[in-house]
Image (cartoon, rainbow, N blue to C red):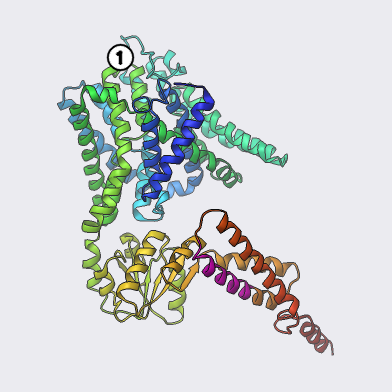
Amino acid sequence: MTGGLLFQAIVFLAGAIICVSIAKRFGLSSVIGYLLAGVLIGPYVLGFIGAEGQDILHFAEFGVVMMLFLIGLEIEPKNFWNMRKTILGLGCIQVGLTMGFTYVFFTIMGFEWKVSLVIAMAVALSSTAIAMQTIKEKGLMDTTFGSSAFSILLFQDIIVIFMLGALPLLSNTSAAPNTDDHSATGSLIQSLPLGLQTLAIILSVVLIILAGRYLIVPMLRKVAKTSVRELLIAAAFLIVFGISFLMEFVGLSPALGAFLGGVVLSNSEFKHELESTLEPFKNLLLGLFFMAVGASINFVVIAKSPLTIGGILIAIILLKALVLFITAQVFKLKLDQKLLLTFSLAQVGEFAFVLLSFAFQLNILDQETIDVMLVITALSMSLTPIIGIINERLILPKVGTKESIKRPMDHIAKSHKIILVGFGHFGSTVGRFLRSHGVEATILDQDSNRVDFLRKMGFEVYYGDATRVDLLESAGIAEAKILICAIDNPNVTRQVSKLVKEKYPHVELMIRAKNRYDAYDLLNMGIENIYRESLDTSLTLAKDVLSKMGFRKYTLNRQVQNFIKYDEESIRRLAKEPKRGDEYIFKARKELEEQERLLDDDFKRGIVDLDNHWDSEHIRKALNTKVKN
């Protein structure tokens, strides 16, 4: 590798910016961009990263450490206990069946039983980093698939503790310990008898729980009293790095310790502060981790036995996919949710690197086996986003939405004049308000489990993809007057809007926009009724602030209406302009200045300053005088 640390930083940042930008331009996940960047700058393509690639991978694992710490913060022990049946049920079936099938597969291939068992443990684990990143990017966390995937991944993250604790019991004690690049640095448990190694692992977990409650929280309280934000940031890093060091010291994965530390601190008053402090660093380090995975793909090993590696890779992905589909079937997930779960978790995860390296250190795996398995792990992670795209764009439209034709067609006979697409938090508020005034709407939603739940709650909701013409027809689009699109996915929103505008021009569209840039796109499509999801809430908050400062409420309500009017006019003018470059910035600034001038003129002209409505002072004084008399 040419150059030092500064050159490495430039290479990684440039690779990330270029490749992720290209990936997002083609509508792909950012994970694909990071993985592609890693492959390109790695030792086997452009060669910007050489033998130190494994060291970078170990450093980049701090992104996974922080991610699991933040996941732990989100899980309060009480909620974790309430989720225990789902976590244990989904997790036990998935991990148990995957390990069983994989063990049989590798035993048939001629591997020793200890080696087959270790590989089965590694293969049973999926990538929390890739799966959670993709789920959050696509806004699927609140779906049945999202919660099911989270439960399985959580169980896997916990079961790794026991897997690592069991590995020393499989150790070939007669052989000398491996000490080359694949092995971890020396740990405390190496010098202990096998029985005490497992005990040391359990004690370290207990120590983290006790330290979180009786040491870390009191320390954070003292740091918070200083009112110095950078000290709290330093304290957050100290917690994560300290727990990681302890876990590495005893020979365990630092990410698991970080997860336990997050769970312990989830009930503390510093939960949200820690989340907001670490989130930016987590995303950056996760990107580095994905790039390091791409760079770690050893093409020399692949070239030696491409057919063997390719065959094992395909077999593992198909085996995991089959088990995940069976697991989803047992828990009665709908077909679309089954397919999403099946293809999202069919890879081997990042904890396999830790598990396999530890097994190599304990002389359970030989050099050739670990080289092959590390390559298969990296390749399976790299292929996951691509498999997800194939499922999303080719399989789901043909197979996953068949249910949407069968289920709604039996019931959408009672079509209404209003069709509401999307019944999440935004759409459900709209639907409930309409129903409270006696106005019914035909509601469409693509989360089949949510549909069943809402039907039990008394809502007339139907499962299906609103971009399908046949579903819209069965929902009564031909007789409908208004279609409300409350989906939080801008791409789907644009597809629905374009379809309805072209095929059903008589239907008035009322569309949710996430921000002003989405509004620009919709306006340029010729859609007039656009509702930015944060506009009214932001103005309500600002209005309440001014009210507490002494402004009259009637005055403020009038000014809010004026603000919306001027802002909508401004957006319609700016929608026609290019959204990049100094010209757009100049015109946007001019619009802001003009908007502020008009609002100020309204006030000075007395449009609202001289009104005597609502809570004006002279009415209050008159009422008070009348009461006294």
Q: Can residue 564 be found in the magenta stretch?
A: yes
Residue 307 in percent (x, y) is at 18, 28
Q: Is residue 616 visible?
A: yes
Give the image quarter of residue 49: top left
Badge 1: residue crowd in 10 Å (few <14, some 14–19, many ≥20): some
Residue type, mark 1 in image: Asn
Question: Residue 525's x, y, as percent?
Answer: 41, 68
| Magenta stretch: dominant secondary structure | helix
Quadrant in the picture for the N terminus: top left
Local secondary structure at mark 1: loop
Image point (57%, 45%), residue name: 276
Q: Nearer the viewer, residue 418 or 150?
A: 418
Magenta-span inclusion, residue 91 = no
The residue indicated by pointer 1 is: 172
Task: Please indicate whether residue 614 sits to the left or right of residue 349 in the image.
Answer: right
**67 left or right of 507 in image:** right
* Residue 409 occupies quadrant: bottom left
What residue range appears in magenta? 560-577
Residue 87 visible in the displayed image? no
Q: Is residue 47 above or below residue 342?
A: above
Q: Residue at x 31, y 25 (%)?
A: 298
Camera-side residue of 543 and 429: 543
Question: Which percent across, then down, holds residue 491?
Answer: 38, 59
Q: Quadrant of residue 619?
A: bottom right
Q: Which of the image's four quarters has the C terminus? A: bottom right
Q: Could you say where residue 598 lies in the image, as x and y percent from the top left?
A: 67, 72
